[in-house]
Amino acid sequence: MKKLSAKQGKTITLIAALAALLTAAGVLWANRPVPRRENGIELLDFPLGSKLQGYDVYDSQGRTLDISQISSTPTLLVFAMAQCGDCRAEFPSYRALLTLFNTKKFQVAFVWDDTVPQADLDKLHIPPSASYSAKGRYKFTDWVPSYYFVDGEDIITAQTKDLAEAALLLPESTVEPESFRQFSGGLPVLLGLDGCGSCKEAVEEMEAAYGDSFLYFLEGQEAVEEGSKKNVFADPHQLVAKAFGVDTFPASIRLDGAGGLLIE
């Protein structure tokens, strides 16, 4: 067998390196976001494992940011439309998502297809710092709402169009007292289940102690009955229970005299 010269060996090594580089470039090109158009608006979908980058969003001050600049920590990005019926149906859950799961280690942010008046976002307890707009230039998917989980390097690790599936992927959360205040306005919270006898007794006890000045969430309930009291809410995805690590009902959550969280 003829032995290769040093020069020939270097040439083969260089060719192999170039081939590997071309292969890697081909993989990146294949996984790039591919724009589609509908009525002149780009419809963008991002495959798992790709990097969420290269598209402009606008913050509450109108400044242009690449979407990768929204956060440097693991993040759940919610893509929604203010006039989308399915999105509006999830608005109550968005409040829980943002206030209870938005921590130093994990963030929740919203990207709207167009500019949404801050007054409307205030009703959802969504502050300007967590809300961005695509200004109607494109939609990120052809279905909203859509939920993208991205890691600290902006790599997409999961994507779903179902908030129930997204809820299962949420990390464990340690709710701080201030986050609880944002969520409940400082009012005590009772978690219960529909048809639970002890939960009904707990409601009566809360009413005796607080009148109507407490919030009652029916975990797993799709909707509350027509004519229900204003302080009764459905939580179809059990986001509140998950945020506080509650798996036994009824459960009450309130601030104690020292300003800490008390879960009973």
Image (tube, grey):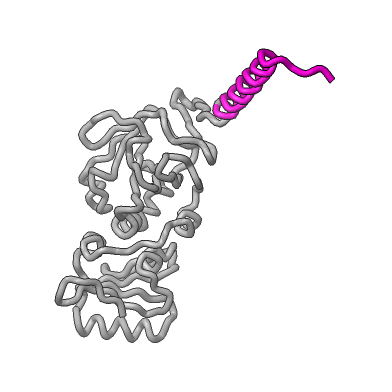
Number of numbered discs visible in the structure rendering? 0
Left or right, 20 with reference to 247 = right
Quarter of the image with the N terminus in it: top right
Quarter of the image with the C terminus in it: bottom left
- In depth, the one of 61 and 170 nearer the eye is 170
Left or right, 177 with reference to 243 = left
Q: Residue at x 37, y 80 (%)?
A: 250
**Where 162 sits versus 204, above or below?**
above
Residue 253 appears in the picture as rendered: yes
Residue 94 percent across, percent down from the top left = 35, 54
Q: Residue at x 65, y 21 (%)?
A: 13
Q: Residue at x 38, y 27 (%)?
A: 137
Left or right, 138 with reference to 98 = right
Q: Residue at x 35, y 31 (%)?
A: 66
Residue 58 percent across, percent down from the top left = 29, 32
The quadrant where residue 135 appears: top left
**Where 142 sits versus 208, above or below?**
above
Residue 230 percent across, percent down from the top left = 26, 67
Residue 186 percent across, percent down from the top left = 19, 67
Span colored in magenta: 1-28
Q: Is residue 19 within the magenta segment?
A: yes
Left or right, 190 with reference to 24 = left
The quadrant where residue 23 appears: top right
**Where 85 sits versus 239, above or below?**
above
**Where 139 sits versus 6, above or below?**
below
Question: Main structural element of the magenta stretch: helix, strand or loop?
Answer: helix
Q: Is residue 10 within the magenta segment?
A: yes
- In depth, the one of 69 and 231 nearer the eye is 69
Residue 225 appears in the picture as rendered: no
